Image: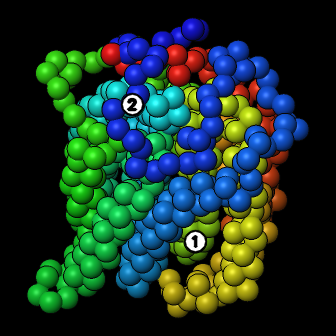
Amino acid sequence: MDEKICTEQRTQSAPPPAKARVTTTLDSLPAGSAGAAQQKINTKQPLPEGITSRMLYKDILRIGWPALVELMLTQLTSMADTMMVGRLGAWALSAVGLTMQPKMLLATAFMALNTGTMALVGRYRGAGNQKKARLVLRQGFMLNGILGLIFALIGIVFSKQLVIFMGPTEEKVLIEATKYLQVQLIGMFTLSMTSCITSTLRGSGDSKTAMIYNTTANVVNVVGNYLLIYGHFGFPRLEVLGASIATVLGQFVAFLMAIRAVRKKTQYVRLEFPKGSIRPDFECIGNIARIGVPSMVEQLAMRFGVIVFTKTVTGLGTIAYATHQVCMNIQALTFMNGQAFATSATSLVSQSLGKNRPDMALHYSRRTQRTGMCVAICIAVFVFTCNKFVLGLYTDEAAIITTGSSLLSMIALIQPFQASQFILAGALRGAGDTKYTAMVTMLTVMLLRPSLAILLIKQFDMGLHGAWYALVADQLLRTLLVFIRYRSGKWTTSFKHNAAAEVDN
């Protein structure tokens, strides 16, 4: 075998200790040969005998719909945060908006780790190798906890400096944004470990459990907003700070529920710490890093580009930035379609390749893209026809609604491209092809978007619209480059190994 993903060995004939909670059509198919796994995929290969498209769409939806519900509710909660904060004024919208990029920048490390964790768990799930899947969870969980604690401490100490770097134009915005960010970063410790558990569950095909605990967290968040932003039922009126506290409380509830879920004996990927298991397994960590480090580079490139882009928009003034923040918040909701079905693509592609079935990886990814496209068209119609109504939920300032309406029309137009980009990139990540997606992100988000925004704003005086033209150009080019890579078929052999050959004792 080209690489060993983790250490222990078992006999080839030994069955996995327990069945996965979520089964797929893939489970009924025989494993392919190691040679087949290393060959370039045949893009015209028909479905295996006895397998229908309906069966594959059923698998896609079984994984995708809980992820879609979870992500939609999470983003709706974020929107509720923004709406409630928005009633305090444009200064409050700006304060919350300025904290997003610094927080995401610090989160890149564990986001990258969890990309590798999800892909590897999917490989072992496909190979029927439960023991190794649990090892990946254990190692990823410990790494996330350490990184979450380090970044929380760093962020708390330097919160004010991080906000200043984003370029607030008013003293009140700086003060409130600093308070908001400090509380958010305290919650990063538990958020990182919850994210690891979520990625592991999704990699094994179980997205429903994550939906349950994250939905509960959203309810806690919204209730906390109502109590703490405005001071209802005797609670103190904390305004922007109250919104941040409510978010972290919700995250803590999700963490407790996630721990309980993966400690159950019936859980396929169970979090357990047998004697001597606290030590780092460097081979396992190395394989997580082999997929995760390029993803980290991608995330850092994205954060860098978005920060430069955001700082450029911030210079347009408080009203322009508040408009931008509202529209970005709405656009983030439209991301949920692509991200949810990208979960299906990543899970099913990694499981297929773990079973040495690149043909099934292709069939699953194609149908996942089609499913996402159908949903994207529906979203596009809604955003295009109801944009002023949606904007009115955030604010009653006419300037924000008028400008925001035209920006949301751009969001509607790019929906099919945006969904395809997310889903096909998810398929590439499931195959371990994270280097290519990192390069695409560096070219588009880090270079094209901020450079074009600066040019259109400063040289052509297009204002906020110029920034959004740059955003649309970024999305379209990213979609094209991801599609070209997907069509080449090279992604199926980008991470060479034979998970099925690695067996437990």
Viewer-nearest of discs 2 and 1: 2
* Residue type indicated by callout 1: Ile
Residue found at x 76% / y 71%: 377
- The amino acid on which the numbered mark 2 sits, given as a three-letter code, is Pro
> Do labels 2 and 1 touch, CB within 8 Å?
no
Measuring 61% from the left and 47% from the top, which residue is drawn there? 25
Quick one: SS at disc 2? loop
- Rendered image quadrant of residue 273: top left
Between 381 and 489, the one lying in front of the other is 489
Residue 16 showing in the rendered view: yes
Residue bearing the label numbered 2? 16
Residue under pointer 1 = 330
Is the residue 335 above or below the residue 295 in the image? below
**Secondary structure of the residue carrying numbered label 1:** helix
Tag on residue 21?
A: none
Q: Is residue 50 left or right of residue 138?
A: right
Q: Residue at x 68, y 74 (%)?
A: 379
Mark 2 is surrounded, within 10 Å at the Cα level, by few (under 14), some (14 to 19) or many (20 or more) other residues, namely some
How far apart marks 2 and 1 lie (CA) works out to 44 Å
- Which quarter of the rendering shows the C terminus? top left
Residue 11: % across, % down: 41, 14
Residue 404 lies left or right of residue 121; in this view the side is right
Give how far across and how far down residue 482 sits, in percent: 76, 41
Residue 65 x/y as whole percent: 54, 64
Say above or below: 435 vs 442. above
- Residue 7 is situated, as x and y percent measured from the top left of the image, at 37, 13
- The residue carrying pointer 1 sits among few (fewer than 14), some (14 to 19) or many (20 or more) residues within 10 Å by Cα, namely many
Coloured how?
A: rainbow
Q: Residue furthest right?
A: 44
Outermost top residue: 1
